[in-house]
Image (spheres, rainbow, N blue to C red):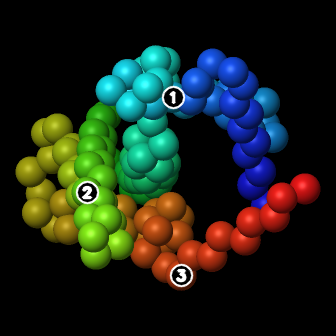
């Protein structure tokens, strides 16, 4: 099980997030919402997880196949319609120099199999307790 913890102090919205593996990131809200814009806001962090997983999944596949594709660029936009409680992730993948349509189709299929993609498109439950 993956565990991440976060804490916020008196500096409004600045949140230190730590992973069990020892990594630290700072999250914040933009100045327009009362934060200081010291780090990504929560929706950006959510999108970043999909970007990171897609990049890693594609890199592993490309390397295993031995294809000479030195760069993969993944972009994710998060579109939130609160009135319908609907969230869309709009993901784009660019592989500079890739012309082969069959390989493009295969990479798209592999991207849709990345673990974070599977989590986001599956059933999700959030169990919360106050300790």
Q: Is residue 80 visible?
A: yes
Image height check: is 118 above or below 47?
below
Circles 2 and 3: CB atoms closer than 8 Å: no
Label 3: how many Cα within 10 Å (few below 14, some 14–19, many 20+): few
Image height check: is 111 above or below 32?
below
Which residue does the numbered mark 2 point to in the structure image?
79
Horizontal side of 68 relative to 14 (left or right) equals left
Pinpoint residue 80: horizontal percent, then vertical percent. 29, 59
Q: Which residue is drawn at 72% across and 38% down?
A: 6
Q: Which residue is drawn at 47% across and 49% down?
A: 46
Q: How far apart are marks 2 and 3 (CA)?
A: 19 Å
Quadrant of the image occupied by residue 19: top right
Q: Could you tell me which secondary element the residue under label 1 belongs to?
A: loop
| Residue placed most toward the observer, 130 or 116 | 130
Which residue does the numbered mark 3 point to in the structure image?
123
Pinpoint residue 61: horizontal percent, then vertical percent. 43, 56
Circles 1 and 2: CB atoms closer than 8 Å: no
Image height check: is 60 above or below 40?
below
Q: Could you tell me which secondary element the residue under label 2 belongs to?
A: strand
Q: Which of marks 1 and 2 is nearer the N terminus?
A: 1
Q: Could you tell me which secondary element the residue under label 3 belongs to?
A: loop
Q: Earlier in the sequence, mark 2 or mark 3?
A: 2
């Amino acid at each position: 099980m993956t565990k991440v913890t976060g804490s916020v102090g008196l500096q409004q919205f600045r949140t230190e997030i730590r992973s069990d593996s020892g990594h630290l990131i700072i999250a914040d809200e933009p100045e327009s919402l009362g934060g200081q814009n010291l780090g990504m806001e929560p929706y950006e962090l959510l999108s970043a997880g999909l970007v990171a997983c897609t990049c890693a999944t594609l890199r592993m596949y490309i390397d295993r196949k031995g294809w000479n594709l030195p760069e993969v660029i993944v972009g994710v936009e998060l579109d939130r319609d609160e009135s319908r409680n609907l969230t869309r992730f709009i993901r784009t993948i660019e592989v500079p120099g890739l012309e082969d349509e069959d390989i493009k189709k295969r990479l798209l299929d592999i991207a849709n199999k990345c673990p974070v993609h599977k989590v986001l498109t599956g059933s999700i439950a959030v169990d919360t307790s106050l300790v």
